[in-house]
Image (tube, helix red, strand yellow):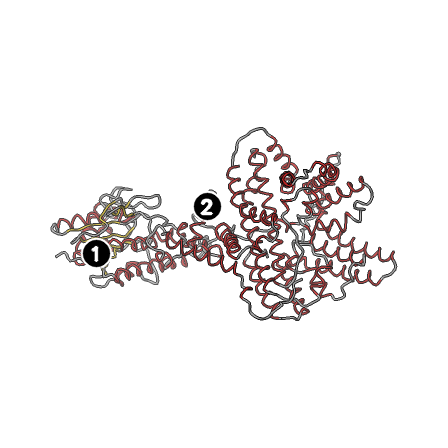
Amino acid sequence: MLFNTGRFALFFLVVFVAYWLLGKRFRAQNVLLVLASFWFYACWDYRFLGLLWFSMLVDYVVALRIEAESDPRRRKWLITLSVSVQLSILGLFKYLNFFVDSGASMLARLGFGVQPIALGIVLPVGISFYTFQTMSYTIDVYRRVIPAERNLLSFATFVSLFPQLVAGPIERARRILPQINGPRSLPSEALYAGTSLISFGLFKKVFIADNLANVVDQAFSRTGTLTRAEAIFALYAFAFQIYGDFSGYTDIARGTARLLGFDFALNFRRPYFAQNPSDFWQRWHISLSSWLRDYLYIPLGGNQRGTPRTLFNLFLTMLLGGLWHGASWTFVLWGAYHGLLLVIHRLSKPLLTRVRPRSLIGGGLWSILCCAVMFHLVVLGWLPFRAHTLLEVKQVLVSIGQHGGEWGDALNYARWLGACTALLIVLELAEELRPNFLERRRFWTRGLVYAAVLLSLLIAGAPGGQTFIYFQF
Amino acid sequence: MDKPSSTSSFSWRRLPFGALFAVMLLACLELGVRAFYKPPYVSLETYTNNYPLAPQYGFEGSRACFPVHEEIRCVVTQDMNIIPQEFPRQKPPNELRIIVIGASISWEGPRPGKSQGNYPSRMFQQLERAHPDRNLRLINLSVPGFGSTRQLVRFREALEYDPDLFIVHTHDTNEVREDKRRSYVRNLHSGIAGKLLYSYAVVVLKNWWNNALHVAAPPPVATGNDEAEDVDIAVKRERWENGLEHHVDTMLELAKARSIPVILVGTSRSDTRDLSIKSGRTLNGFFATRANGTSVQFLDVPALLREAVKARPRRVFKDAVHYNAEGAQLVAGALVPLVEAALPLR
């Protein structure tokens, strides 16, 4: 059940009405939410409901035991058990095929002909998101950051809350559980904010991402024959497609949650205005990057064990972050690329600080330059993310590297890119320069923007409810 | 987390003025487009009354007859092989206008692909010879391949030309193609996106967007409609027949409202079978039930040609349904007294 379909709209309408008819009885509301979330998940594939329940029950029980346990060794053993179970689930369903195939291919190169067993394991939707969410909960209980949740219904609501179940944001228990365990309300501000988030989310997904998907799919279906200009514009198009797709999904998720009285964490903050790799990861998929920081980078030692170890930790964190996205060498390459960017930025930081002009205008121009360089580095990074194989990556790089060449379909790509992203760029630029730009404007300015967004959806919204890219993770 | 609402009393400041203003802007845009944009055919009712259709997606996107100064000029277009002709926009005093609405049978003459010598023109020649003192004009709006849906569109358009008599020759072989179109239109207007095509503003802007970005036009017949092979042919046939009867009835009602007489020309085939078999009633039988004195007359073509066909089918037909010179002459001759009865010629 996709967010951008009439089926979801009907489902949400029913849940929304029933939910608020229950008034302030938040326990009853939680029952409704859990049932609705299980139904929502079952619409994808009911067979994996059991897996979701198993993952949830393991962490519910283990967290209670960890809290009750005072012996550090037993506590450590319990947290190891919990993390191992969650990672095993993830490893079995997401990575086993990848490792088996990669192992067989490596043995074949060494001269050992091995036929890998076709396991035919289907990837359960949202598995990467809910396993990380429950893992963060048990680790926080282990660290005594939060108490263990005693109410199974509340915990089930936290894990399975449908707006974020299949593609995040990866919420933290310390933020969501207090909201689950208390009465919720729907003031008019939340109603408007929720509706506005959903509308802008649909705009990003249906207007920007789905329209640009036509350009990108067309280009990546013939990576061997792309001209230089086509390859470049296809990459630009994918940069905006992936942003529109994922941030659009997140906006809809946050908007629906808001209409149910929840406040989800911000997941995107105009990432293409980042001035360096570190800044980018504080703006892109914030819930994942902060998860990786808190539960991987810092436990590895963070920046507390000297420069070489810091650089290693940065690189490893991003490498694993890349692998988290998908079981493929292209995602490993993407993670390694961003790890390398972070390492280089870390090393060049003192130099960059020294050369940055101090004057207002010079500083501003420097920021614009950094922003442009970082944007293009990110765009280049999207190549392995979008390509299906390393060969495709190579072919596109060769296309970009060739001299001159014809335009081919590049002008058409550029037209699509301009038409689909103009409004978004203007809005994001205004928001970047003056935060809460739109909220501060008079009603007619807001009305004009809303009308433009609505009209874009009406005239050029790609019909058919295309799936979200991040649902495959 | 959201704080509970701080006040329960109404405050006008809480109204979503931005959203309301956006809705107002869109409503104004729709009204503005409706005021200045006219779809390229007679009226929207043409379609909305029958098969709701967005202008740019219809099979009647363009008109064949255009007003040019004081003239109406009918020209062949890409999708309409109408007979090229010109006639005054305002009907001159004492002129009697006979408009023919039909398909290939009333369009084509004895030579394949040529309209010269078709039965309406032969009829007109006979009428002119018989009534040299009367100012008669024949406007033949027949188009090969047109079924009753598109004939109804032409019929409504023809009402603008102030006719004194309609000759309607509808033939059910063309209903199949139009039924496919109807299935396409149903498919096109399904879902939320399809419903949006009822908005003129959406249609105009969508057209602009599609042209600017070279978006390919939708396929002529969408897949997934009920034209699939497994659909019962009897069900489809009944639907075609119901549609045809509905369209003919609509034409008769429109003509009756303006007191314009109509002559219905019956269908025929070289093997003498009537095509339409519905509950034991033929299409010609249906036409016969609508005949009503001089206001609606019926020319029973099968009865007219039966003897000739029995003797030798090729005597009056050049193929399965189209007349040769002799057939056209026979039909024309039979029509003349009906026209004379309908028009104040004597």
Q: Is residue A125 visible?
A: no
Residue toward you, B56 or B81 = B56
Choose the circle earlier in sequence order: 2 or 1.
1
Residue found 55% across the figure and 69% down from its top? B10
What element does badge 1 sit on?
loop
What element does badge 2 sit on?
helix
Measuring from the top left, give residue A366's x and y in whole percent.
65, 38
Numbered disc 1: what chain? B
* Circles 2 and 1 on the same chain: yes
* Number of numbered labels in the structure image: 2
Residue toward you, A148 or A436 = A436
Gap in Å between the C-alphas at discs 2 and 1? Answer: 43 Å
Numbered disc 2: what chain? B
Measuring from the top left, give residue A43's x and y in whole percent.
61, 59
Locate residue A78 relative to residue A208 in the image: left or right. Answer: right
Measuring from the top left, give residue A156's x and y in whole percent.
71, 63
Q: Amino acid at mark 1?
A: Asp
Q: Is residue A399 visible?
A: yes
Seen in the picture, residue A55 relative to A375 is either above or below; the reply is: below
Measuring from the top left, give residue A221's x and y in whole percent.
57, 40
Seen in the picture, residue B164 relative to B328 is either above or below; the reply is: below
Locate residue B318 relative to residue A328 in the image: left or right. Answer: left
In the picture, the disc for residue B210 is 2
Determine which residue is flagged by label 1. Answer: B164
Question: Alpha-carbon neighbours of circle 2 within 10 Å: few (<14), some, or many (≥20)?
Answer: some
